[in-house]
Image (tube, rainbow, N blue to C red):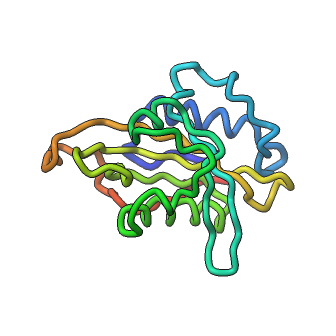
Amino acid sequence: MYRLPAGCEEPALQIFLDYWESRRRDGRLPARCDIDPLELPKALLPQILLFEVIRTPERLRFRFRLAGTAFSRLVGRDVTGLIFDEMGPPERTAPVSEALTAVVESGRPAYLAGRLTLRSDSFEHVRRLGLPLASDGKTVDMILSMWLAQSRPIGDYSTPSRAEAMVGKVQLLEGD
């Protein structure tokens, strides 16, 4: 069982991780067909993202296959079908691209806290959890993700949690 980082006491992320864990069989990663979003609490669905992994000779890229309504509303458009790294300048998209790449390369869930990378007019603190999916149980070909945003005025970094202290750093979850 994988564990969220110390200091991350977000019940929605734990529910999401527990659901993914329940879909694993014999230590293998679940496939997309093992996931039924309707089995998750309805309140979580607007925060769910599903990425398709695109392997190119240069790097891994990630296509939005599904974007919850809250995410689309926050970024101001439906992003389904778009490539993540084309959503903004590289310095803004790099942290999430690195987290998604870490999920693919390690086959482990990853946590990333920090600023929303696709918006600059306000500080949206976001906690993200990416969960690997693999059609063959081993080679990650999709990533199921949840993000939870909290609006804060620019410059307001008061009392970050222990998990937020790792802002911008990908944390691969411990466990098996």
User: Is 83 displayed left or right of 87 in the figure?
Assistant: right
Q: Where is residue 149 in the image (x, y as percent from the top left)?
A: 36, 38
The outermost residue toward the top is 42
Going 54% across and 33% down the picture, which residue do you hit?
Answer: 68
Going 53% across and 57% down the picture, which residue do you hit?
Answer: 84
Question: Between residues 53 and 23, which one lies in front from this camera angle?
Answer: 53
The outermost residue toward the front is 77
Going 61% across and 59% down the picture, which residue do you hit?
Answer: 62
User: Is 132 displayed left or right of 163 in the figure?
Assistant: right
Q: Position of residue 10 (x, y in %)?
A: 42, 34
Question: Between residues 101 and 81, which one lies in front from this camera angle?
Answer: 81
**Up/down of 52 relative to 95, above or below:** above
**Up/down of 38 relative to 22, above or below:** above
User: Is 105 displayed left or right of 84 in the figure?
Assistant: right
What quarter of the picture does the N terminus occupy? top right
Q: Where is residue 61 in the image (x, y as percent from the top left)?
A: 61, 65
Q: Where is residue 135 in the image (x, y as percent from the top left)?
A: 83, 52
What quarter of the picture does the C terminus occupy? bottom right
Going 50% across and 61% down the picture, which residue do you hit?
Answer: 86
Question: Between residues 1 and 18, which one lies in front from this camera angle?
Answer: 18
Exactly how many numbered labels are in the figure? 0
Question: Between residues 58 and 95, which one lies in front from this camera angle?
Answer: 58
